[in-house]
């Protein structure tokens, strides 16, 4: 494969990208040409608002072609386009062939939840100290154990679910199904895992089967009755909206465990759930918090 590097002003990025796609580039990436200099520009707007600009003043555009000949042909054809007079060719280079599957896998090592509880990709052997493991590979749905919110939820499950008090469990916004699988590994017998995303439902079904645990997976309308443990690792905004729904699903004597919350959002969540329960911060990691309530 061959890499073609170009310099392009903001006003012609779309035209250049379209041209490269038409010339059968395998991939196209765009980066700020002035990154890490005084001229660097941030393109992120305020939360919920569009960015202030759609592109950088000067961009480095990198296109990957299958062969050197295709890259050289692309240069000649680009030079014939009027707008390309404003762009520049920075050069071409060969890309060393790599085993991309192995390279990707090398980025995901086993994740320690506790010294005896680990998340282990299928291509790794479990650590010697692991007495309980979840087999999980990176996929389309959120939840591989690498994010602090997932780890904190699983630590709580490991510390509490093994008590036998949480036979019926709801994992709301299940993503990969990792929390539901964790509950099953620690003794829960009746587990519902639900999500609004069909891809998450499919991922959870696959992961539960791969871990040889029984989890009832479906869309959110599959929820029924009350649960001794309700888990929801989403984000603060939807968690606030879901307060009435989630709280009415917790049976007396049960627990609500919420994650996906930044430490600065603790008071917002406490206020949203105050009519139903008393939320408390029970763990914190890397700026994220775990909030729980006993019913």
Image: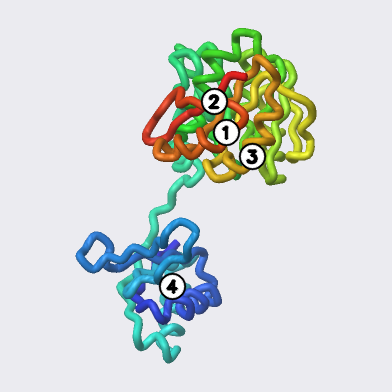
Considering only order in the chain, which callout, 2 or 4, is on the residue closer to the N terminus?
A: 4
**Disc 2 secondary structure class:** loop
- Which mark is on residue 156? none
Task: Tell me which residue sits at (35%, 71%) in the image.
Answer: 56
The residue indicated by pointer 4 is 71
Considering only order in the chain, which callout, 3 or 1, is on the residue closer to the N terminus?
A: 3
The residue indicated by pointer 1 is 273
Considering only order in the chain, which callout, 4 or 3, is on the residue closer to the N terminus?
A: 4
> In this rendering, would 154 be left or right of 246?
left
Task: Tell me which residue sits at (74%, 20%) in the image.
Answer: 190
* Residue ranking furthest to the left: 38
Q: Which of 107 and 64 is in front in this view?
A: 107
**Disc 3 secondary structure class:** loop
The residue indicated by pointer 3 is 242
Task: Tell me which residue sits at (52%, 33%) in the image.
Answer: 259
**Disc 1 secondary structure class:** helix
CA–CA distance in space, label 1 to label 2: 7 Å
Residue 96 appears in the picture as rendered: yes
> In this rendering, would 61 be left or right of 253?
left
State yes or no: discs 1 and 3 in contact (Cβ < 8 Å): no
Q: Which of marks 1 and 3 is in front?
A: 1
> In this rendering, would 220 be left or right of 149?
right
**Disc 4 secondary structure class:** helix
* Number of marks present in the image shown: 4
CA–CA distance in space, label 3 to label 4: 52 Å
Residue 80 % position (x, y): 43, 90
CA–CA distance in space, label 1 to label 3: 9 Å
Q: Nearer the viewer, mark 4 or mark 2?
A: 2
Residue 49 % position (x, y): 47, 63
Residue 46 % position (x, y): 42, 59
User: Which quadrant of the figure contains the N terminus?
Assistant: bottom left
Q: Which of 265 and 258 is in front in this view?
A: 265
């Amino acid at each position: 494969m061959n890499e073609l590097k170009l310099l392009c002003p903001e006003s012609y990025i779309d035209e250049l990208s379209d041209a490269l796609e038409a010339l059968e580039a395998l991939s196209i990436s765009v980066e700020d040409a002035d990154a890490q200099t005084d001229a660097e520009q941030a393109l992120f707007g305020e939360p919920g608002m569009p960015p202030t600009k759609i592109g950088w003043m000067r961009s480095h555009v990198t296109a990957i072609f299958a062969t050197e000949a295709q890259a050289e042909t692309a240069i000649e054809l680009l030079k014939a386009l009027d707008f390309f007079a404003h762009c520049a060719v920075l050069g071409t280079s060969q890309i060393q062939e790599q085993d991309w599957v192995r390279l990707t896998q090398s980025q995901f090592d086993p994740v320690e939840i506790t010294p005896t509880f680990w998340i282990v990709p299928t291509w790794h052997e479990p650590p010697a100290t692991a007495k309980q493991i979840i087999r999980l590979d990176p996929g389309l749905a959120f939840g591989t154990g690498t994010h602090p919110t997932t780890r904190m939820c699983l630590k709580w499950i490991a510390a509490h679910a093994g008590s036998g008090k949480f036979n019926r469990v709801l994992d709301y916004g299940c993503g990969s199904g990792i929390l539901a699988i964790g509950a099953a590994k620690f003794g829960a017998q009746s587990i519902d895992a639900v999500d609004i995303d069909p891809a998450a439902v499919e991922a959870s079904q696959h992961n539960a089967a791969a871990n040889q645990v029984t989890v009832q997976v479906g869309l959110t309308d599959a929820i029924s009755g009350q649960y001794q443990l309700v888990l929801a690792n989403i984000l603060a905004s939807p968690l606030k909206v879901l307060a009435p729904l989630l709280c009415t699903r917790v049976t007396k004597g049960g627990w609500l465990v919420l994650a996906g919350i930044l430490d600065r959002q603790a008071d917002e969540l406490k206020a949203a759930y105050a009519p139903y329960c008393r939320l408390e911060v029970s763990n914190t990691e890397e700026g994220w918090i775990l909030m729980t309530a006993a019913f």
